[in-house]
Image: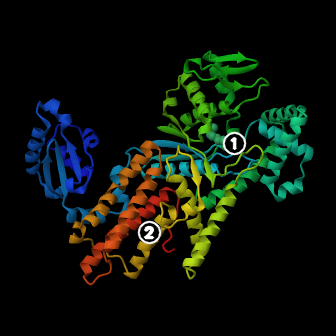
Amino acid sequence: MKQQVVHILSKVVDLPEDQLKQLVATPPSREQGDVAFPCFQLAKALRKAPPQIAQDLVEKLNTQDLASYAIEKIVNMGPYLNFFFDRQKYSAQLLSMNITELLQPAQVDHHPTVIVEYSSPNIAKDFKLYHIRSTMIGQALANTYSALGYQVERMNHLGDWGTQFGKLMAAYLKWGDDETIKANPISELVTLYVKFHEEAEKNPALEDEGRLWFKKLEEGDPEAVRLWQWFKDESLKEFSELYHLLGVEFDHYLGESFYSDKMDRVIQMLKEKGLLEESEGALVVRLDEQNIPPCIIQKSDGTSIYATRDLAAAIYREETFDPEKILYVVDQRQALHFQQVFSVLKKMGYEFAHDCEHLSFGIMKIEGEIGSTRKGKGLLLNDVLEHAVQKALDIIEEKNPSLEDKEEIAQAIGIGAIVFNDLKHHRTHEIDFKWEEAFNFEGKTGPYVQYTHARICSLLRRAGQAPTEIMPHSVFEKDHSWELLYALQQYPSVLVETTKKNDPSQIAKYLLDLCQLFNRFYAQERIIVEDIAEQNAKLVLSKKVADILKHGLSMLTIKAPEAI
Ligand code: ARG
């Protein structure tokens, strides 16, 4: 709608379309019109009072062919121009578009590249509950950018390098047993790692042994490399299963180890630019002017560090993909780390540092419980997901025991409940997940959206084929239909907002609103009626709501079963 208004305005107002786009607004209620245009901005240039400008513009606009824009009338109210659409005509136009056609105007032109880095768990460690936030926020952003025509590189920056693997090797060589590890790789490796820390408290010399093994790994010692590869392969097997369950996919698994041979160049560049300083045997870049602690580049024993690998990774990404943005979906505890890394890149003269953004997020608890990693405690994502699927299955058994494909649907609902609950909050908020709340089919939940979608699908099944011919109809005139149609045409701009703010909760909230509008419509209208034209109009509208609910859920990586 806004686009159509911008287009007709551009014929009579001497402002570029881009600027007009910024100015058009949504009036508070449909009684005041569908799109508003405030005339304040024009006052200075035209040396006239805004209400006068509004009046002049109405006269000029009325000489245009309003009908070809599906505009019924334009009214000036004080300094505003209010556009009223021809509800019947506009609805028929909108409803005859498929999703691709609908999204087309919101698409970016030249497919700029966006790198989204997300999930990035540490190998030989459990995939903890808090990793789900990075994983699902990142995947949702990747989906949305992609739907808007960006070239997206989905990247997993696996934590697969660092002193901790030296410690793990030392622990394995002392206490490890191949058979037990093979039977239960990650949990055994975690146990070994925990034991290492317990023992090292009594015997600090162990720490040196750990460091030595990491040094060996960095130097390419075959035994160290073999063990490391083994730990990594086993971890990836488990992570892949989880990703599969969640519907998450990556284009690149470029873990920290990938950058192990790309760090010397970074250190060399830092030296040449005179940015490196020695501090207690380590090499650092001072960031005093930013008022933040120095960024450590190399430890006193000559081994590399997390930040150095991030510098190498950022430069690699820039050189390989020439991205418009690099997004790092990582929890808020790493805010200082990214501030340091981006600052060092700026000091090195890399302009692209301004295109790097740390998208931080708050922690997630379940019924108040959170996990710590070091001691190997905390909730495991896998257990939580299993519990969720079981809960969904129990609900189905109780409410709809004859449903086909129960297991598959329970999986969609159970996982959907958790993921939706995660994504409906602004990412920076802390989340306390409550089982009863997240599974409330009438609350602000994934199951509520899924259920509304399935309800429409069942309606369409009952009515037989959805009609293909879409005609203007008086049913679209009614306020509760028009509100729904109005929301449908807003969908592309919701996706655009999501990418502008890097905030998938925009989509989740929109879907909840759309469901509410549909349910209101459904409560007031009988869909299956005598009059075929009327029934068709209602079915077409319902079908479009279902399509958008399904598409919106898919942006959040949530499935939309056709029956529940
Ligand atoms: N592996 C880290 C963790 O689990 C997250 C990595 C974040 N990404 C980065 N480029 N440093 O905490």
Q: Nearer the viewer, residue 285 or 531?
A: 531
Residue type at mark 2?
Thr
- Rounded to the nearest angstrom, the CA distance separating label 2 from label 1 is 40 Å
Q: Is residue 381 above or below residue 205?
A: below
Q: Is residue 280 visible?
A: yes
Q: How many marks?
A: 2
Q: Is residue 473 visible?
A: no
- When asked about the image quadrant of residue 29, the answer is bottom left
What residue is pinned by disc 1? 159
Residue at 59% over, 69% down: 392
Q: Is residue 139 left or right of residue 59?
A: right
Q: Is residue 458 above or below residue 67?
A: below
Of the two numbered discs 2 and 1 on the same chain, state the one appearing first in sequence.
1
Residue type at mark 1?
Gly
Residue at 14% over, 52% down: 74
Percent from the top left, x then y, of residue 350? 53, 26
Percent from the top left, x then y, of residue 159? 69, 42
Q: Is residue 287 left or right of residue 7?
A: right
Residue at 57% over, 75% down: 396
Quarter for ligand 1?
top right
Find residue 452 and name its label: 2
Beta carbon of the mark 1 residue lies under 8 A of ligand 1: yes
Residue at 63% over, 54% down: 366
